[in-house]
Image (spheres, grey):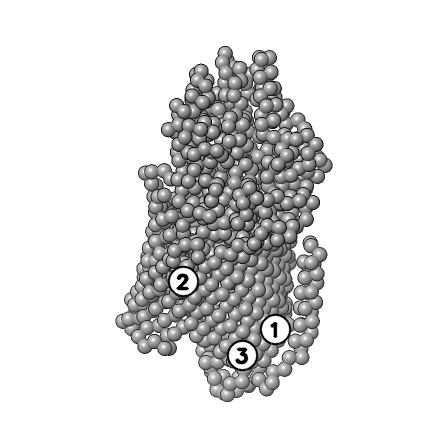
Amino acid sequence: MKPRLYKTGILFTFLITFLIHSSAFAQLNGSFVITGKIADDQGHPLESVSVQILDTKFGASSDSAGVFKLVGNKPFPFTIQFSAIGFAPKNVTVKSLNDNINVQLFSQSMIANEVVVTASRQAEKLLRSPVTIEKLDIKALKESPAPSFYDALGNLKGIQLTTSSLTFKIPNARGFNIPNNFRFMQLVDGVDMQAATLGVPLGNAIGPTELDIASVEVTPGAASALYGMNAINGMANLITKNPFQYQGLSVYQKVGVNHVGEKDQDASVLTETAIRYAQAFNNKFAFKVNFSYLRGTDWQSNSTNDQNTNDKNTANPAYPELNGENNPAYDAWNKYGDENNNAITLSGVNYQGGKKTFLVRRTGYWEKDLVNPVVDNLKADIALHYRIKPSIELIYGYRVGKMDGIFQRGNKVQLDNVIVQNHHLELKGKNFQVRSYVSIENTGNSYNLKPLSDNLDLTNLSNSAWGAKFKTNLQQSLNDGTDLATAMKLARQFADQGRVEPGTPEFDQLKNTIIGINNWDHKNAGIAGAPPTGGAWLLQKSRMYHTDAQWDLSNKVKYFNLLVGGDLRIYEVIPDGNNFVDFSRPIDERNKPVSVDGKVPDSSNFGKNVYYKKYGFFAQATKTFFNDKLKVFASLRFDQNLEFKPKFNPRAAIVYSPKEQHNFRFAVQNGFRFPALFEALSFVNNGNVRRVGGLSYINEGLGYLDNSYTLASVNTFNAAVNTDVTAGMTSNDAALKNRDLLTVTNLPPTQPEKIVSFEAGYKGIFLDNKLFVDLDFYHNTYTGFLGQVEVSVPKDATVGSDQAVIDMLASNRSKQTRYRVFTNAKNSYKNYGSALAVTYRFYKKFTISGNVSYNEIKTNAQSDVFVTAFNTPKWATNLSVGNREVVNNLGFNIVWKWQTSFLWESPLANGTVPSFNTIDAQLTYRIPAWKAYIKVGAANLFNTHYIQYAAGPTIGGLYYTTLVFDGLFGKINQATK
């Protein structure tokens, strides 16, 4: 643990201890205290029941023993309302302090009175939401067998949760899944949790702890009409516990084990500790503090799948004996340094009576040898709530998280001591809300595995020197009569002599040196005695500033309800000399190297900061007709990113409820997604390929938009050239003969991505509130879909000229500059699907529920400049059965998950992800007298090893025990209205 984070932990522990003791002196200033107990229809205590004095701000919640304590100062008599998910609400009139308040609640539908706020930015019944929305309340989160509340998102209808690392999970919905998901927004109490320059939320790295989460609301579909950029595939809002309502000290301890029964990894212990303390004073001021720390051994990405099999023209299809383990152009999913940009053409090899050409690749290094398997996540937050007036509340919040793990973009990144901070200030009243926050990112000691592997090899020999050494030994072995496959293996062993090998002190020392260098170019490749100049350090320290506001004008408008709002967002890009550089500099200085001493350079070395700005406004009108049976929603959003033309996002929706238990919904909307920072502004050399943003001014003088060939066509071109050279032609003549195989890229500057989405759905309750059905259908059309295409630019020629064609020869690799460009697809893409969820409450408290989702994409007749990577299984299901109290204080839940196989496509790896199914299970035993419960559970109970995406980690079983003490020392629980 870093010293400053260790000190932060001590500070939080001291603060909690101090506040526990100081809270004993809190005075009630004449307010009365009402106590009572709440039980279910079988007499068992009910926790987390909302207790509210009607028409006041005074409220509370029951603890694990069913006991509540409520403060108030309203004259007698008055009415208290008791409500909880899964039970019919009940009102009780209190006439004096002597009243004995023992309340019994009776079961009903789980969602009959459930309220959500995310779908339309206002509180409304879940049953009457205008778009598909899923919710996990506090009870569902506690009863889930998933190892964390965040993992439980994967059990929701239509949600695909992808595990990039033990500490980093990524939700997605309705297709086009990627491990760094720019299209899915994640909020915590309305605050965007993304890391500014990485552009995505780092899972739950700085989100709520297990003790502070109250509920999760997920919209699995376009939400940009109200929320703007980055919400076209969906969004999740993690809602935390209010310190007025949930008070006292809570402690959480989980101990688990994973890697059970694995061959190359011993079983490992996982631990997670969390502490929460909250206190309210006189219904005027409240605070809460949270602290948690998780540590474990990460899942390993150890697949040996070859994505450059010998039947491809980037290998050696003319020689079938060079297949499988004999493939010299092998490109493994989880090996780095063996990619296409490290391909070497061996021309003029004497074999079988003629001059032959072979394609080989550098050996590279396995992922397991480059990453640190031990990961952790430390996070803390504090929130201060002050009621200026009974209906106006001022909130300040601070969050900080430090994490390790694996992040995947075009390549994989080892996140090491990444720190993200968030300051949040909010003022909210009955009809308005104003919020400002800043996200501060520091990627710490993180590094990119691809340049690390490349530079480990290049420190020994340049690609050309390694290829020459390989060719010499290959020819010698063939002359000696060695068969081709064996000769290839011997040549590799000979060429690799002198390179550092994993497990040696020399490897560790060189690896650490390269990780400490912030320039990924290797300037002295293969020069004997030269120190390494190419590095792998990922240094990003940018910031995001955001302000938003909304105002409910319904009481000022006569004929309909009206909500208006707006937001402003500014990204401050701090040039780092590697990923984001000063574009005002001359081209040859854009990727300016830094010193190799491993110190963080002064950002002033890289020029002025770059600002990426966006603002927007929205208005939403709602109107009910026919005695509230028909509700109509209409909204319009205006968004302006200063790099692009203004965009308008309309949404129209209707909800028809012929009866309260039956609700039909229809919605149509369009949305835009502005390119994320990396898609718009990046400029980084990564393994002989420069990854660049698609804005026109970044392209100035470089030519990747207007003077390039697609790499796919360059590979096809060279395969044809090799065939003709083998037949006796010169390479230049063969190049000119096959010039028509080269495809000019001709890319326009990057534009925003657009979606037009239609969805229809139904929510209904049957069988006396025992059966709940939720069904939805959707159809999306994407235009200007954003992705990456790899291109090759002739250094000193114009595409179409003879010289440019000759420069595309594999032997002229030094005359090409290769770029991986973020650009828009030329085709439109349509995808569609449906999802069904059913919950049935039967005998006593037994509940069985299940959901199934179907997702499909329509294939276009004409190929595009890049693959769009739908990356979604056609069918996915979740089936669960449980009982929160099968016997006194003992409950259980079992979840079965299954999904079909599907094709995964990405710049890093391509291939089929096999189908898999798993079972999660848990037993929970409550100890009301201690305000505690114990949960024993397993995620992937039968330890079935599976992957969720190509090049992703292999996931096995995780077995855990959790002990929770909740609401200790909670003297008086006061809630917001």
Identify the residue position indicated by label 1 in the image: 279
**On the rendered image, what quadrant is the N terminus found in?**
bottom right
Q: Residue at label 3?
A: 388
Disc assigned to residue 514: none
Is 450 or 302 nearer to us in this picture?
450
Q: Residue at x 59, y 74 (%)?
A: 286
Q: Amino acid at mark 2?
A: Leu
Q: Earlier in the sequence, mark 3 or mark 1?
A: 1
Considering the numbered disc 1 on the image, is that residue within a helix, a strand or a loop?
strand
Q: Residue 176: x percent and y percent?
A: 43, 47
Q: What type is the residue that disc 3 sits on? A: Ile
How dense is the environment of label 2, judged by Cα within 10 Å: few (below 14), some, or many (20 and up)?
A: many
In the rendering, at what x and y percent does residue 795 appear?
A: 49, 34
Disc 2: which residue: 226
Query: Which mark sits nearer the N-terminus, 2 or 3?
Result: 2
Few, some or many residues within 10 Å of mark 1 (<14, 14–19, 20+): many
Horizontal relation, residue 484 to residue 249: left or right: left
Query: Which mark sits nearer the N-terminus, 2 or 1?
Result: 2
Disc 3 crowd rating (10 Å Cα; few below 14, some 14-19, many 20+) is: few
- Nearer the viewer's eye, disc 3 or disc 1? 3
